[in-house]
Image: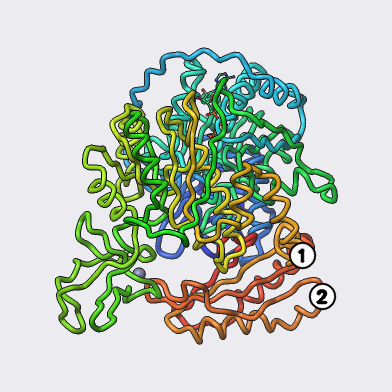
Amino acid sequence: MRQIIRIALDVPLDGLFDYYAPAGELLGAADIGLRVRVPFGRQMRIGVLTALPKHSELAETRLKDADAVLRDLPPLPAEWFRLCEFCAAYYHAPLGEVMLSTLPARLRRIDPPRARTPRRTARTPFPCPAPALTDEQEAVLAAITGEEGFHPYLLHGVTGSGKTEVYLRLIARALAAGRQALLLVPEINLTPQLEERVAARFPDVPLVSLHSELGEAARAQHWRAAFEGAARIVLGTRLAVFTPLPDLGLIIVDEEHDASFKQQEGMRYSARDVAVFRARARDIPIVLGSATPSLESWANATDPRTRARYQLLTLKARAIGGARLPAVRRIDTRQEKLQDGCCDALLAAINMRLARGEQSLVFLNRRGYAPVLSCPACGWISHCRRCAANLVLHLADRRLRCHHCGFECRVPKHCPTCGNQDIMPFGRGTQRLEAALAARFPYARVLRVDRDAAKSRKQWEALVARIRAGEADILVGTQMLAKGHDFPKLTLVGVLGADAALFAADWRAAERLFAQLMQVAGRAGRADLPGEVIIQTQYPDHPLYAALVRHDYAGFAEAQLKEREQAGFPPYTYQAMLRAESPHMADAIAFLATARAWPQAAEYPEVMLYDPVPMRLARRANLERAQLLVESPSRRVLQAFLTPWRSAVAAIKTPSRLRWHLEVDPMAF
Ligand SMILES: Nc1ncnc2c1ncn2[C@@H]1O[C@H](COP(=O)(O)OP(=O)(O)OP(=O)(O)O)[C@@H](O)[C@H]1O
Ligand SMILES: [Zn+2]
């Protein structure tokens, strides 16, 4: 009798796979969680040993021999198994795919390249002593009991209120209790400053970061240090939420509202939600922090009907003595002629900053020179051939570029249809604004900060260093600049082109716009110089802007939640989205229609299936896209429905090039 082993593999098939143990090996319960090399199809693959079953449902003659059990790493722990099982069940993804996708690439490789010890990033943190806490910070820290057990907190602190200082104190407590701390951040290449700050506070404590810009070797090494307990502080992006941590005692999710906690391909999970599940399973405290919490978290912390699942903690004032929240002004652009997209008041305010040697930031959330190139003679416009979208004009490198599929080409010298030589950029992006401001203020140093100017973490860090060193007078930037930065000389923020999001079809657009504007406004006047924000709008009376003027997140959130409740949107209802893409729209719609017509659906009266519709960006990279929304007032009922429904969907015969996926708690519509 040969021993049977059950393996999780990274293949898009449900279920686990049985093999014979490699010849000569006898495995025991303590080996569960080891990686195993097995033949699959014509290849070898790495899987994870999940069980030692007595029997296999496969005929014994069909079982293959596993190739080797890998012992370079201790077995993955039971807690990690439970986390993966939860995700597989909740997000309806194959368990093997979930498990393997959470491991660093190197550990999934058949023949990992010889491990070179990655160069330690030369970091010489000069230790930085903790400041005396403000009264508000004291109160928050006193409210966080430090008791063992699952305690979820929502830390709502205005921009610059010193949330990070609260995190550092909590981390210190966890370390003192002999525990590891996990600090999740939305985008690590946007927050090298945070890493520095943590390292400076704890110069003697081993800290690792885990994010996608790390090389494979460094990532594996950092992961391993965390997994073996050598690293006591783990700072990472969404993927880090799965890192096995033997002594985990605290989880912090900074900027918990940020959309980048949501994984948008493969297993579509929310790292914030997974973190909350993990804290509960592990019975430890978790702190979600933001100046603009997601409405889901806000409802969890304030709605009496959900019995206030999270404890709300508040920081109302800026931490630095004398620093005030900026004054916010709305300028009605219906009343005046703009110059290069800017109103007189904004230009005058910039002028004043230049005279005083302070910095200004003009915020425009649109990259490129102009969103489209067009021919006034024949009406041609620069369409992407592969998407239902326009090609964006990038004059900096003279390219037309699709922001959806990445297609790009040279800027034509004349109109491709009629030959007219005077083709014109239409609308305004950051490059055009940069050029216009540079022409208008010839003595000012104008610096553009967007994804084109900061493609890598290095470039980004260089830009931030220049801003902090005062080497720029006017910044032109996208949302990249909105998050978590401290520029002491920045005292003016101008906001252009925000109105479009007010009337967007996506019902989450208002929440995102408010958060973005509040965050970007929060960059102004963080030190002793007072800040000012100028919003250009055609709708100065819109309640969203009015709330912004009052710095009234709570008022805005309550009004939004009321609307959501009346309209039956999350968090008062639970959703899943089935999406299909195919070369032909008719095929995608037909597939979704078949899924919708599932006969057993009638057994779930509390589940609503909507009509399949084309997605807003209906074609991307030559594929037509459609979606079907599923909704229920009960998360439990929705989950009970999704399990059998997904199996039924998987059994639908589809044209060969049709692809589909299911997303639970979808964020974008
Ligand atoms: N207790 C304190 N005493 C003095 N300065 C403090 C204190 N706490 C924080 N600060 C300073 O206040 C500034 C803002 O703090 P921090 O960056 O932690 O705010 P934040 O709430 O994380 O802001 P944001 O949400 O805008 O990123 C920093 O310069 C920080 O050094
Ligand atoms: Zn395209």
Residue hosting label 2: 605
Residue 122, numbered circle: none
To which quarter of the image does residue 566 belong?
bottom right
Decide if residue 72 is in sight here.
no
To which quarter of the image does residue 289 belong?
top right
Where does residue 291 sit, x and y in percent of width and height?
Answer: 60, 39
- How packed mark 2 is, by other alpha carbons closer than 10 Å (few <14, some 14-19, many 20 or more), is few
Where does residue 338 sit, x and y in percent of width and height?
Answer: 37, 57
| Camera-side residue of 520 and 91 | 520
Q: Secondary structure at mark 2?
A: loop
Residue 496 placement, left or right of 577: left
For the residues labelled 1 and 2, the Cα–Cα distance comes to: 20 Å
| Camera-side residue of 104 and 55 | 104
Decide if residue 376 is in sight here.
yes
Task: Identify the amino acid type marked 2.
Answer: Pro
Which residue is at 64% across, 72% downward?
629
- Residue 21 in the image: above or below residue 445: below
Question: Colour scheme used in the picture?
Answer: rainbow
Residue 207 placement, left or right of 310: left
- Residue 147 in the image: above or below residue 506: above
Residue 441 placement, left or right of 75: left
Task: Identify the amino acid type marked 1.
Answer: Gln
Where does residue 549 sit, x and y in percent of width and height?
Answer: 59, 45
Residue hosting label 1: 566
- Looking at the rendered image, the disc whose residue lies closer to the viewer, 1 or 2, is 1
Ligand 2 placement by image quarter: bottom left
| Camera-side residue of 254 and 424 | 424
Q: Secondary structure at mark 1?
A: helix
